[in-house]
Amino acid sequence: MKEKKVLYSLAVLLIGLALMLGSLLRAAEQANATPKVPAGNLAENDRAITANAQKMIEEGRQVFRFDTFGSEAFWGDTLQLHKAIAGQKNGGIGEGVSPKTALSVGLKVDADA
């Protein structure tokens, strides 16, 4: 009698787990399914999105490379950091920084200078 209850409980548990697993798999498939969009609109939208993304990337590159966000006046005019980096041999002050050290701390180094 006790064995039947254990087997019955085990069977119910396995069926419940199988149903839960099936439900989770079905939900995952639905989440990964692509929505159906008319083909004509999809290509036009994709072109617009791609063009906008490329424009934003180019603008970001310009900002990253050339904008100083006002810090140039502080680092250059107030602290005169460029003179400390250049060193006394190159018209600056102090010992200066070697190109290897400058690169290791993330500074840009002009190979022609």
Image (cartoon, grey):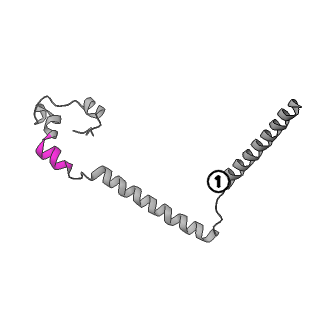
Residue 103: where, in percent of width, then height? 29, 34
Up/down of 31 relative to 37, above or below: above
Most foreground residue, 35 or 5:
5
Q: For the magenta stretch, what is the residue range?
A: 71-80
**The N terminus lies in which quarter of the figure?**
top right
> Residue placed at 15% from the left, 49% from the top?
73
**Which percent across, then down, holds residue 15?**
80, 43
Q: What residue is disc 1 on?
A: 32
Report the quarter where the C terminus lies. top left
In front here: 4 or 85?
A: 4
Judge the density around disc 1: few (<14), some (14-19), many (≥20) Cα neighbours within 10 Å: few
Task: Indicate the quadrant where residue 52 lies.
Answer: bottom left
Q: Quadrant of residue 14?
A: top right
Magenta segment includes 35? no
In the picture, measured across the screen, residue 83 lies left or right of residue 33, that is left
Residue sitting nearer the eye, 44 or 22: 22
Magenta-drawn stretch, dominant element (helix, strand or loop): helix
> Residue 33 sits in which quadrant?
bottom right
Residue at the spot x=22%, y=29% of the render? 98
Position of 46 relative to 29 (above/below): below
Q: Is residue 12 left or right of residue 52?
A: right
Q: Is residue 77 magenta?
A: yes
